[in-house]
Image: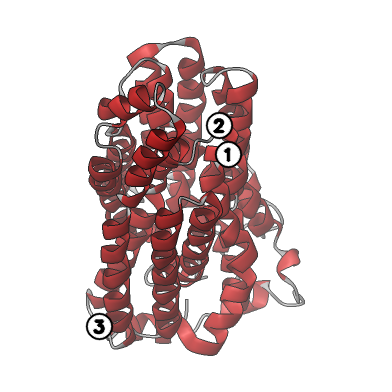
Amino acid sequence: MTDATTVTAGKKGLSPIFIIGMLFFIFGFITWLNSVLIPYLKLACELNNVEAYLVTTAFYISYFVLAIPSARILNATGFKKGMSVGLAVIAVGALIFIPAALTRFYGLFLLGLFIQGSGLALLQTASNPYITILGPPESAAQRISIMGICNKVAGALAPIILGAIALKDADGLKARIATMATAAKNAELNELASRVIIPYIVIFAVLIILAIVIYYSSLPEVDTDQEDESTAISNTGKSSIFHFPHLLLGVITLFFYVGVEVIAGDTIINYANTQGIPLETAKFFTACTLACMLVGYGIGIVCIPKYFSQQTAMKLSAGLGLVLSVLVILTTGYISVLCVALLGLANSLVWPAIWPMALAGLGRFTKIGSSLLIMGIAGGAIVPLGYGALADALNPTHAYIILIPSYLIILYYAFAGHKAGRPKLKLTEQL
């Protein structure tokens, strides 16, 4: 990190942290609405499991498509204006939910989700490296953990708020439409679809206001193209991001990590329902998963780097994830569902650890490296879809076997992958 970056950020006190925290709150709120949209749209649009999990596919595949263009946009606009553009794009995606609800056309819902994900890709491409380089690299996981609290508090609130509106009396509705004639059933489903119109109008208005606030905020720019002396020396002769294998392995790891995080949060409502738990109760379970993540973030803030490193945190997280994945498969009912929720604790410190480990030593390649990591978020599009296919082919419990190889990949990166191709330097060196 350059001295200029540190001084510029320091002059603004806590203001940059507060602003980025506000953005992470938005990430969490928009992202974890999907956990309610999956059972909601499955009912409203009469979908099977694979079709319902296209919600996550449409949302997260946008990260893969838009990651590299996002880096180019940020090069042209800078971080602050780019964040405003990202918020405006998310607002457009939210607005599309209105005609989608009026027509009950699933394709329009998916389009709205893709556009929302596109705006989030731009926001995340800017904010994740920004918070990483806003202080010492060895405490980056601590700062990202603070951002994670903002993210997951919003994520815990989002399904509760939307679930109270969209899934109200969902169990009774499922029972009623099973015996209705086509015309009466369509009328009930049209009423169900219309429930999201007002919430998404509110979301649109809030996002536009925030875009204006960010645009005129005091958020400082940081120059990620400059390198300190040691980073410049280690990067001598490197002309491509492909000269950093620890970054490329980090992208693969992030791909599978996001997949398991989305599975833990977005499948738990449907899964609990298959275990005989009513939707009226199950709609709160995503909040339980995110509450477990909040506990993990709290541990990260207190313990990293004082008591253990971000690498150690990642090893412990992956190991716990493996154990819980096996328990989900071997148990049933509330115990199995509880193990899914506890995956939130296992997942909590993986994201904060991957970013500083993968971006370490990139210097002038930081923006493109961040873009590739954002592409890895597309794991949320593919891995949950694999879970949905296994749930239809086998059963929803045994489908969680997809978690085991994912956590093994995370464990490998924690032990060895983050060192690949790097000189024997301490992670505390400047980015």
Q: Is residue 15 left or right of residue 290?
A: left
**Does 209 appear above or below 415?**
below
Q: Is residue 294 visible?
A: yes
Label 1 sits on residue: 51
Q: Is residue 158 left or right of residue 380?
A: left
- Image spot of residue 206 (x, y percent): 26, 70
> Which amino acid type corresponds to the residue marked 2 in the rendered image?
Asn
- Image spot of residue 230 (x, y percent): 58, 75
Q: Is residue 228 visible?
A: no
Label 2 sits on residue: 48
Badge 2 crowding class, 10 Å Cα cut-off, few under 14, some 14 to 19, many 20 or more, is: few
Colouring mode (rainbow / by chain / secondary structure / one colour):
secondary structure
- Image spot of residue 391 (x, y percent): 58, 24
Is label 2 in contact with label 1 (beta carbons under 8 Å)? yes
Q: Earlier in the sequence, mark 1 or mark 3?
A: 3
Residue 12: image tag: 3
> Which amino acid type corresponds to the residue marked 3 in the rendered image?
Lys
Q: Earlier in the sequence, mark 3 or mark 2?
A: 3
**Does 384 appear above or below 220?**
above
> Which amino acid type corresponds to the residue marked 1 in the rendered image?
Glu
* Mark 2–mark 1 distance (CA, rounded to whole Å): 5 Å
* Mark 1–mark 3 distance (CA, rounded to whole Å): 47 Å
Q: Is 411 or 208 nearer to us in this picture?
A: 208
Badge 3 crowding class, 10 Å Cα cut-off, few under 14, some 14 to 19, many 20 or more, is: few
Q: Secondary structure at mark 1?
A: helix
Q: Is 14 or 80 nearer to us in this picture?
A: 80
